[in-house]
Image (spheres, rainbow, N blue to C red):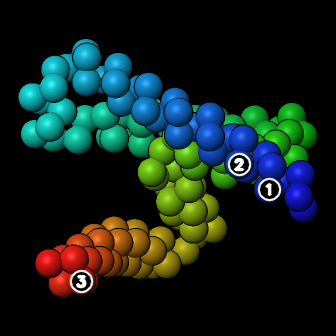
């Protein structure tokens, strides 16, 4: 158990650092004005990370590497993206034929998270105003 927590922590640190570096690279590639007007860097890491999550899930299952899931999936890709675990859970529901559950999961996750963030902002503004 403690080893898995260490793997998650290590992978998370590496993933978060990579997200930061990729974000800088995207800003340099497309220009600061473009990034500030639309979240290109975050979309980039989410799409790339989700792709890598898909590759790892299959590779780990076929090569017997599922023991690396805490390091790679939860830690590295979880720290790298803001979206890969969400994408994996959605696809898992779809592959199980649970389309309704997948739709509910997507809507509740996206809308609920945005609403929760707005509520948090409002609450914090009320406290710190």
Q: CA distance from mark 1 to mark 2?
A: 6 Å
Which residue is labeled 2 in the image?
Answer: 9
Seen in the picture, residue 2 relative to 100 is either above or below; the reply is above
**Residue 10, how many percent across, how many down?**
72, 41
Q: CA distance from mark 3 to mark 1?
A: 34 Å
Q: Does dot 1 land on a helix, a strand or a loop?
A: helix
Q: Does dot 3 land on a helix, a strand or a loop?
A: helix
Residue plotted at (35% across, 72% down): 113
Q: Tags 1 and 2 in contact by the CB under 8 Å rule?
A: yes
Residue 20 falls in which quadrant of the image? top left
Seen in the picture, residue 54 relative to 117 is either above or below; the reply is above
Q: Is residue 67 visible?
A: yes
Q: Nearer the viewer, residue 120 or 102?
A: 120
Which residue is labeled 3 in the image?
Answer: 127
Seen in the picture, residue 123 relative to 39 is either above or below; the reply is below
Badge 2 crowding class, 10 Å Cα cut-off, few under 14, some 14 to 19, many 20 or more, is some
Q: Nearer the viewer, residue 48 or 26?
A: 26
Residue plotted at (58% across, 49% down): 78
Residue plotted at (57% across, 68% down): 93
Q: Quadrant of the C terminus?
A: bottom left
Mark toward the start of the polypeptide (3 vs 1): 1
């Amino acid at each position: 158990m403690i080893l898995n927590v260490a793997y998650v922590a290590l992978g998370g640190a590496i993933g978060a650092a990579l997200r930061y570096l990729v974000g800088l690279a995207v800003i340099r590639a497309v220009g600061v004005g473009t990034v500030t007007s639309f979240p290109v860097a975050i979309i980039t890491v989410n799409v790339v990370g989700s792709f890598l999550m898909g590759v790892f899930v299959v590779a780990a299952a076929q090569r017997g590497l599922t023991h690396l899931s805490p390091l790679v999936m939860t830690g590295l890709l979880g720290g790298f993206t803001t979206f890969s675990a969400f994408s994996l859970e959605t696809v898992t529901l779809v592959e199980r034929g649970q389309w309704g559950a997948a739709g509910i999961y997507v809507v509740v996750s996206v809308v609920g998270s945005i609403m929760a963030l707005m509520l948090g902002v409002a609450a914090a503004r009320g406290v710190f105003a």
